[in-house]
Image: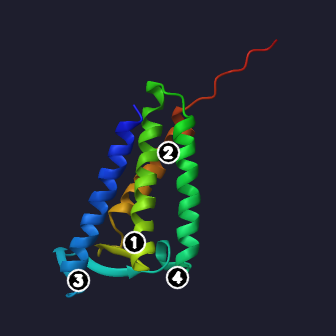
């Protein structure tokens, strides 16, 4: 059963890295191109910080923090009961882990994260596929913890 999440994680990381490679090859030379006028462009950005560019230039800090968080996610994943009702929680952890690893690969090997999706109808940071994994996984995780997973009542002795 643990084999499938590993394969999915590797596949998601591969999709992220392939899209970033395509952005490097096709977008870096031209900087930006309109995808859907007034809604979304493909814009090449070398993100050397975190979300919204905070903590710019702290490459090794992000690498170390991501490794620590990834180890914690793997540990939590392995400690979850192997029951059907934890499936969505496992999915959220796989998404978060895949996104974290996808971006840390960029930071480690390039010194920056490749971002390329830009919503033009709002003022929002340029982002990538790994960011989508992290956001969707985190929203799912929070939703499950807040509204779905209930602590089992303890029996009084």
The single residue placed furthest to the right in the displayed view is 157
* Earlier sequence position, callout 2 versus callout 3: 3
| Label 4 – label 2 distance at C-alpha | 27 Å
Q: What x and y, as percent, mark residue 50?
A: 50, 73
The kind of secondary structure element at disc 2 is helix
Q: Residue at x 51, y 33 (%)?
A: 148
Q: What's the CA distance linking mark 2 and mark 3?
A: 33 Å
Q: Earlier in the sequence, mark 4 or mark 3?
A: 3
Mark 1 or mark 3: name the one nearer the start of the chain. 3
Q: Secondary structure at mark 4?
A: loop
- Mark 4 or 2, which is nearer the eye? 4
The N terminus: image quadrant: top left
Q: Residue at x 54, y 48 (%)?
A: 73
| 10 Å crowding of disc 2: few (<14), some (14-19), many (20+) | many
Residue that numbered label 3 is attached to: 32
Residue 141, disc: 2
Q: Quadrant of residue 36?
A: bottom left
Q: Where is 124 relative to 90, above or below?
A: below
Picture coordinates of residue 96, whole percent (x, y): 45, 53
Q: Name the mark nearer the viewer: 4 or 1.
A: 1
- Give SS at disc 3: strand
Question: What residue sits 48% from the left and 25% below the top?
Answer: 83
Query: What residue is shown with label 4?
Result: 56
Residue 62 in picture, x, y percent from top left: 54, 71
Which mark's residue is nearer the viewer, 1 or 3? 1
Sequence-earlier tag: 4 or 2: 4
How are the colours assigned in the image?
Answer: rainbow
Seen from the viewer's position, the closer of residues 96 and 35 is 96
According to the picture, the residue beneath numbered tag 1 turns out to be: 106
* Disc 4 to disc 1, C-alpha distance: 14 Å
The residue closer to the viewer here, 84 or 2, is 2
Query: Is residue 38 at all visible to an observer of this figure?
Result: yes
């Amino acid at each position: 059963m643990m084999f499938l999440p590993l394969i999915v994680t590797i596949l998601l990381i591969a999709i992220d890295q392939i899209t970033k490679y395509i952005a490097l090859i096709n977008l870096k030379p031209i900087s930006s191109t309109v995808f859907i006028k007034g809604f979304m462009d493909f814009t090449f950005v070398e993100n050397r910080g975190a979300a919204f560019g905070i903590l710019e230039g702290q490459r090794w800090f992000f690498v170390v923090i991501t490794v620590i968080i990834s180890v914690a996610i793997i540990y939590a994943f392995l400690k979850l009961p192997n029951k059907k009702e934890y499936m969505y929680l496992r999915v959220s952890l796989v998404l978060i882990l895949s996104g974290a690893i996808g971006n840390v690969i960029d930071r480690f090997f390039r010194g920056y994260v490749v971002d390329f999706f830009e919503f033009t109808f709002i003022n929002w940071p340029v982002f990538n596929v790994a960011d989508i994994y992290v956001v969707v996984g985190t929203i799912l995780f929070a939703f499950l913890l807040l509204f779905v997973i209930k602590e089992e009542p303890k029996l009084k002795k």
